[in-house]
Image (cartoon, grey):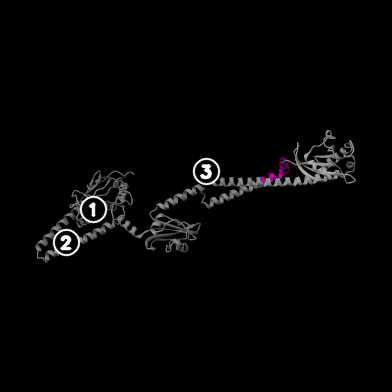
Amino acid sequence: MKKLSIRWKILMLCMIIVLVSIAVGSTIVISHVIQLKEQSLSERSLLIARTVAQIPEVKNHVQRKEGWSTIQPIVENIRTIYHANYIVVMNMERVRYAHPSYDKLGTLSYGEDEIEAFTEHTYTSKAKGDLGVSVRAFTPIMNENHQQVGVVVVGHLLPSMKEILKDFQREIVWTLMITISCGVIGSLLLANHLKKEMFQLEPHELARLLVERTATFHAMYEGVIAIDKKERITIFNERAKQMMGVSGDVIGMYIRDVIADTRLPEVLYTKKAVYQQEIIVGNQLIVSNRIPIEVNGEIVGAVAIFQDRTEVAKMAEELTGVRAFIDALRVQNHEYMNKLHTIAGLIQLGKTSEALAYVFEEKEEQEALMHFLRTRIRDESVAGLLLSKVSRAKEMGISFTIDRSSMLFSFPPRLDRHDFVVLLGNLIENAFDACLVTEREERFVELWIGEQEDGWMIVVEDNGIGMREEEKKHLFDYGYTTKDGNHQGIGMHLIYNILKKSDGEIHIESGWQMGTTITIVFSQNKGEDK
């Protein structure tokens, strides 16, 4: 079922309020009118009854037999003049001497509310008869000696609800027209104002946006904090709580009470955004972007998006391959220092021929490797990476062999040297790490890079620790790692993204304590037409 718009909801609500108000008001007014009418008719009936009771002919003939022949015409004239519904005159024996119906003259009356009237009481009462509800006035008839000789009863019918509404028909119609018109116009003006304030969105659309916004902010890896113009927190996602050491619900609290040195309120007053600024919040060094929130030219708040400076640096190193080259330079420097120490030791021992042979041996090995890399690996970045990994493997006591039939003259579609550095660097480093945690004396890692007309293939094999089945399932998950230390757990995730970008395929053969072989294949034609 289609949801009603806010305009229709407000219009219907206003109409219900207007109609209910009219119904309640009408009921109160009509009840008051009936009360006033009843009071007016009671007073009028009482006045007519007293007037009839004071007529001499009525006083004299009510005591005579068949005196109704004199009293009836007089009373009927008075009834007609004063528009009474009925006037009844009775003697003390309750014999009727005047009545609207001639056939009841001379008959007895048995009304229960007439008893007090025969004891010199004057009063009014309300009774329901065949014609409807009536107001009746009772007055005793007193003779010249102040003795009661009869009773006068005057009655007026109360108007029905239908008759009262008919009397006020015009006023009711005008009231309905005016109130309904005002209700419709007012509701439409209110609905349009609310729609404008809500950016022309419906309440359910705003609710969905709020849920989506909250879920998005909490899913972000960066910390997000937002405040309004009164410095009260409106957004504080889970990542921000982890980084700032904050727990519990802080929405609605003042930012200075939660984090004293956030520097976010400064943006409210300077009205200038600050990008990529390193600041210390608590004991945390963060990279922060602080931006004022502007709506219709007015600053209504500010938002800060920030990351841990240390994590940013580590991630940047992994993404760009900088860390790999830094490690390579460190390893190469350490290797050359060891070789120099060896040569210096042989010379000091007087074994110059052995020192010279050692130098030639190292030179030949290095030249052979350099010649292979220059002729078979055409990209300097990839060649430099492989050269650094050879040196690093020697330092760690791992035999790292690059198959001399390997070649790389170009890159697969959609990939560049940066992608290949990240790809090979992570594969080789993972193989090294797997070898380091084994208890084998001989540890080896072998690499083969093949380029043919139909595509490219990379094979990395090691005799390291291997992988369990559970580890294989989560191998490409972001942040998943089985290593200790400061590893980010994004290496294989980066490889997965590179493969996805170029439509590459990966095959893994691994067993626990049996080593791992990873084969990656890129097709020459895959991905080019997409």
Q: Residue at x 33, y 60 (%)?
A: 310
1 or 2: tag closer to the N-terminus: 2
Q: Are marks 3 and 2 in contact (CB under 8 Å)?
A: no
Q: Is residue 8 magenta?
A: no
Q: Secondary structure at mark 2?
A: helix
Whole-percent x and y of residue 222? 39, 55
Write down the residue under mark 2. 339
3 or 2: tag closer to the N-terminus: 3
Single out the mark in the foreground, 3 or 1: 1
489 to the left or right of 304: left
Q: Are marks 3 and 1 in contact (CB under 8 Å)?
A: no
Q: Residue furthest top?
A: 103
Count the marks: how many?
Answer: 3
Q: Residue at x 15, y 58 (%)?
A: 362
- Which residues lie in the magenta part? 161-176
| Mark 2 crowd level (few <14, some 14–19, many ≥20, 10 Å Cα) | some
Write down the residue under mark 1. 437
Q: Nearer the viewer, residue 178 or 101?
A: 101
Write down the residue under mark 3. 3
Q: CA distance from mark 3 to mark 1?
A: 62 Å
Q: Nearer the viewer, residue 45 or 325?
A: 45
Q: Is residue 163 magenta?
A: yes
Q: Amino acid at mark 1?
A: Val
Whole-percent x and y of residue 165? 71, 42
Whole-percent x and y of residue 116? 80, 43
Q: Amino acid at mark 3?
A: Lys
Q: Secondary structure at mark 1?
A: loop
